[in-house]
Amino acid sequence: MSKTVLGVYNSSDEVIQAIEVFQNEGYSVKDFSIIANTAAVSSYIEDETKVASQEVSATIQPQTEERQGFLASLFTPFEDRTYPENDSRSTYYSYLVAQGISEADALKYEEDINSGMILLLAEKGLENVSASDGISTKDFTRDRTGLENTFETDKQQSLELREEQLDVNKQRVQTGEVEVKKDVVEEQKTVNIPVTHEEVYVERRSVDKTDADTITPMGDAEAIHVPIVEEKVEVTKKPVVAEELVIGKKQVTETQQVTENIKREEAKVTKEGDASVNETTTNSNRVDTDRF
C-alpha cells in the first residue's frame, strides 16, 4: 500500500506531539512511519512513541533525463539551490515517488529531509485531508499542530489550548446507624395525699337541775360507744402514656470543598529576529469587524 506524508517537523518533540494528535483522531501506532536523515533522531522517536522509522537506502540512483528536465525547469531561477549529483537527494526522492507521492511534493520533502527535518507518513487512505483535495498534507498538518514554517504569513491558523476540568460525582454510602429503643428506669416518687380521720371529743357542761333520776339505781354501768373512722392510703400503679417519639429521616445539605491539582495548556510565544507579535483577545460570540 502506498503512503502519504502527514507532516514535516523541525524536531523530535514536534513529531511526538503530532503523533499524539493523530492518535486522538483514530490513528494507531502501526499506521505511522518516520523518515529522518539522522539515526539518533529516529531512534529517539521510536523509543518514545513505538513508531517505526523508515530506512531509506543510501544507494545513489542516477537521475533520468526526464527527471533532470523536471528539476531544471523547477530550479532554473534558483541555481544556487540545486544539489550536486552525488548527494543522497535522489534516494529520498525515488522512495517518495515510489510511494505514490507526486514529483513536486517528493522534491520538497527531499529538501526538508536533507535540511534536518523529519517526515511523518501514514498508509494512504487513512488521512482525512490529502494533497489531492487541493491542500498539501504538509501544510495541513502544520496548520493543525501550530508548526508552520513557511513564509505564508497571510494564512490564519489556530492552536487549541486544552485544560483539565474536575468531574465530581457523588455516591451514597452508609456512614453510621441510629438505634432507638425503650429502657425501664426506676425512680422514687413522693406524693402528698390529704387523708381524714375522726376523733372523739368530750365536752363537759354544767347543769342547773337539782333533781336526779331516782328510778335508776346509782351504780349501774352506762356506756356510750362512738365508732371512729379514718382514711387509709392505698397505692396502686398503672401505666399511662407520658410522651411520644416520632422517628424519621430528613435531608441536610452542606458544602464540602474538594481540592485537586489540574493541568492546563498555555500558549508560549517565542520571537526570533525582528519579529513583532500583536496579541488580542476576541470573544468568539462577537463578530470582529476589524477583519472585514
Image: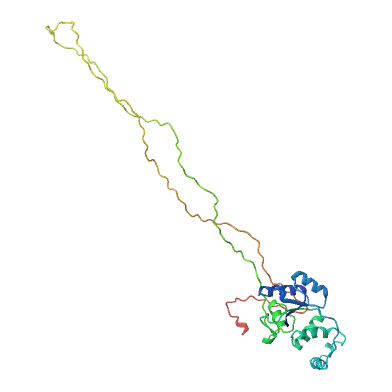
Depth check, front residue: 166 or 46: 46
Q: Residue at x 80, y 81 (%)?
A: 113
Seen in the picture, residue 69 relative to 123 is either above or below; the reply is below
Residue nearest the observer in this picture, 87 or 288: 87
Quadrant into which the C terminus falls: bottom right
State the count of labels: 0
**Where does the image place residue 176, in percent across and percent down from the top left?**
54, 49
Residue at the spot x=80%, y=83% of the render? 92
Is residue 74 left or right of 242 when viewed as pictured? right
In the image, 68 versus 111, the foreground residue is 68
Residue 15 location (% of width, % of height): 74, 75
Q: Closest to the observer: 75 or 196?
A: 75
Q: Quadrant of residue 155?
A: bottom right
Q: Residue at 76% of width from left, 77% of height from top?
A: 34
| Residue 145 vertical placement versus 83 (above, below) | above
Q: Quadrant of residue 89?
A: bottom right
x, y percent for residue 106: 77, 85
Quadrant for residue 170, please give it.
Answer: bottom right
Question: Residue 23: horizontal and vertical position, in percent?
Answer: 68, 73
On-image quarter of the N terminus: bottom right
